[in-house]
Image (cartoon, grey):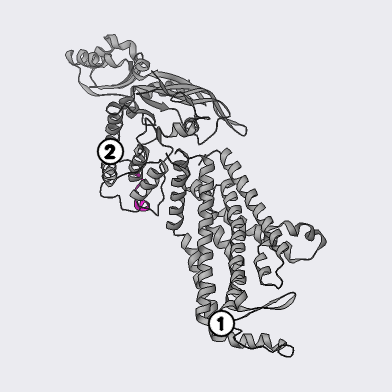
């Protein structure tokens, strides 16, 4: 009676039926279409302005303003906003039900509290995956359809890297996987705070505050910050960009993946531990 | 007789505040128990502990002879409840809410079963309306449907009358009695409407300040209780003199003009009426406070 599968099915059903869940999809659609529209009209001028400085050194040929570049730009832009969209839904998963009183209904059925938290966490990951899939479809496939394919010119702190079009698909695949892992950390953090707090807004705001503080710490090259930087999950949320370097720094990526996974396990463990001991007084 | 609920010296502390202080009581299977107590007496905390929403600081809770701490899963399969007030997913309709509930309880409902359940609680025809459009009374009815969906042996109802219209209260009373008499359900009913409790319940538990004050059969507990009777007679010297010279004079606790306050047992009231009317006293009004109300106020204010 009331097995984990049934609880998970309920959580997935609620996640996709909640009006709040659609905000993320609308925002992603809007931002992608806005950027694609803007680059379609003004992108050539912008690209020629940027490539001017390299033209004395390189002979740049072909379609620079292509689907790969647009996808790279969109991913770079949205990876900062995506945690907010993820937290908007996952930060409310437990605390929203605590505040509305429906948690009492859930906890007076036969499923254990651990099963309920895990089902909610998985439904949060499912929602995160849906957001990323939409982003992938819009940023990669629609951009390719509008702008065509071509080599990716990636400008980073090390300089200019050109990734050949026939060597890029696997990089996109792994970069979306790392992006999913990064956003799963956010979903896990939001779930943890949602288990601890009893109203639906505070966990969302707290997640954003943590991300902002950690990002600020990561921005400054100060010795005291440098000690903690490697262990902040925000430092590793942009690890996907390493896949667009040549050669790919595999060890750095694996270290980032490890740190992100440790955070997920830590946040989830705290969620389960706390929720199992929580008194439901609302 | 097996006990559906057994609390042994259960306490709950929130920081420095002791909400429940060594409470002990039993609910026998097949009975309808009234669970009474003034506001802040620890009633809700006790019900939440019985349903596993709050963990006791000390003591043991057993349902159907099984420890709640060790056998929660098996126990919850046999228990249905409304704690505080029923809450739902407002963005879903009533049937979708019940489907979630059925799935969480591990049962599959057919359309016919849903129809029967909506009929039973008086929501037929409204099952496809979003719950956010429901009135409080309709939510109470849907809460009952949610409680009954997995056919529990023990039903715990915390203030189920709240928000119900008079017809709803009568329907609920009949439903509780039917569930008990025809389907053998054990019911623990927490309510502040003591007349309702007296009418429905055959046993009761009264708690106050986190402790059990009394537990037992309603009829037995009230059998020796006197009622606070208000009697208004016609304002003539004969009538007033008749009352003062009758055997009821010793029961008068207060009088003002032709209005008298008496303490009587319930079976003394018909005799009082016949005695006075036979001696030509006109009775303008006679009423009394509910016996359970009287008893409840006495033991909780003691």
Cα distance in 3D space between marks 2 and 1:
66 Å
The disc placed on residue B29 is none
Report the residue at 36% width, 28% height from top.
B187
Q: Is residue A156 above or below residue B53?
A: below
Residue B120 pos. (x, y %): 27, 39
Please tell me whether mark 2 or mark 1 is closer to you in this view: 1
> Overall secondary structure of the magenta stretch?
loop
The answer to whether residue A130 of the structure is visible from this angle is: yes
In the rendered structure, which segment of residues is drawn in magenta? B126-136
Q: In the picture provided, is B234 more to the left or to the right than B88?
A: left
Residue B224, image quadrant: top left
Residue A11 pos. (x, y %): 46, 50
A224, B20: nearer the viewer: A224
Residues marked 2 and 1, same chain: no
B49, B202: nearer the viewer: B49
Q: Which residue is mark 2?
A: B166
Report the residue at 60% width, 48% height from top.
A268
Q: Check disc 1 and report its element: helix, strand or loop.
A: helix
Q: Residues within 10 Å of mark 2 (few under 14, many from 20)?
A: few
The disc placed on residue A39 is 1
Q: Report if residue B135 lies within the magenta region.
A: yes
Q: In the picture provided, is A222 more to the left or to the right than B83?
A: right
The answer to whether residue B163 of the structure is visible from this angle is: no
Residue A220 pos. (x, y %): 76, 66
Q: Chain of mark 2?
A: B
Q: Check disc 2 and report its element: helix, strand or loop.
A: helix
């Amino acid at each position: 009676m009331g097995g984990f599968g049934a609880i998970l099915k309920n959580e997935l059903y609620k996640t996709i039926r909640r009006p709040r869940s659609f905000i993320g999809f609308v925002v992603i659609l809007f931002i992608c279409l806005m950027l694609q529209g803007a680059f379609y009209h003004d992108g050539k001028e912008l690209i020629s302005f940027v490539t001017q400085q390299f033209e004395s050194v390189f002979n740049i040929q072909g379609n620079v303003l292509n689907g790969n570049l647009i996808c790279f730009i969109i991913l770079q832009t949205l990876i900062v906003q995506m945690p907010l969209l993820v937290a908007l839904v996952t930060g409310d998963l437990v605390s929203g039900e605590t505040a509305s009183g429906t948690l009492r209904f859930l906890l007076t059925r036969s499923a254990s509290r651990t099963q309920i938290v895990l089902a909610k966490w998985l439904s949060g990951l499912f929602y995160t995956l849906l957001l990323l899939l939409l982003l992938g479809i819009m940023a990669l496939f629609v951009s390719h359809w509008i702008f065509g394919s071509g080599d990716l010119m990636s400008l980073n702190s090390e300089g200019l890297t050109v990734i050949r079009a026939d060597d890029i698909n696997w990089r996109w695949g792994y970069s979306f996987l790392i992006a999913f892992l990064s956003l799963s950390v956010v979903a896990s953090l939001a779930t943890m705070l949602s288990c601890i707090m009893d109203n639906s807004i505070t966990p969302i705001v707290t997640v954003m505050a943590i991300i902002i503080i950690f990002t600020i710490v990561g921005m400054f090259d100060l010795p005291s910050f440098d000690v903690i930087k490697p262990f902040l999950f925000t430092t590793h949320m942009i690890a996907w960009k390493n896949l667009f370097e040549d050669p790919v720094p595999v060890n750095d990526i694996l270290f980032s993946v490890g740190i992100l996974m440790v955070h997920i396990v830590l946040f989830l463990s705290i969620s389960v531990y706390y929720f199992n001991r929580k008194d439901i007084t609302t | 007789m097996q006990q559906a609920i057994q609390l042994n010296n259960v306490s709950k502390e929130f920081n420095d505040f002791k909400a429940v202080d060594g409470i002990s009581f039993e609910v026998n299977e097949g009975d309808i128990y009234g669970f009474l107590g003034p506001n802040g007496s620890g009633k809700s905390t006790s019900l939440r502990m019985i349903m596993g929403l709050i963990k006791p600081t000390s003591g043991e809770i057993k349902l159907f002879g099984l420890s709640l701490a060790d056998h929660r899963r098996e126990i919850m399969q046999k228990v249905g409840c409304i704690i505080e007030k029923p809450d739902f997913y407002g963005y879903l309709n009533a049937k979708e809410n019940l489907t979630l509930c059925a799935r969480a309880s591990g049962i599959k409902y057919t359309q016919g079963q849903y129809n029967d359940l909506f009929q039973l609680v008086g929501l037929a025809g409204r099952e496809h309306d979003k719950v956010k459009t429901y009135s409080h009374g309709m939510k109470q009815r849907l809460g009952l449907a949610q409680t009954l969906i997995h056919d529990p042996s023990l039903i715990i109802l915390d203030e189920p009358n709240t928000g119900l219209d008079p017809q709803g209260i009568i329907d609920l009373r009949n439903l509780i009695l039917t569930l008990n008499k025809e389907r053998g359900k054990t019911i623990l009913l927490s309510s502040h409407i003591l007349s309702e409790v007296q009418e429905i319940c055959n046993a009761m538990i009264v708690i106050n300040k986190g402790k059990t004050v009394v537990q037992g059969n309603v009829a037995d507990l009230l059998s020796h209780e006197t009622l606070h009777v208000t009697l208004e007679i016609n304002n003539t010297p004969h009538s007033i003199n008749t009352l003062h010279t009758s055997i009821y004079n010793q029961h008068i606790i207060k009088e003002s003009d032709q209005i008298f306050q008496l303490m009587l047992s319930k079976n003394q009231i018909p005799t009082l009426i016949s005695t006075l009317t036979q001696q030509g006293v006109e009775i303008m009004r006679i009423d009394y406070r509910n016996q359970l109300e009287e008893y409840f106020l006495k033991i909780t204010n003691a």
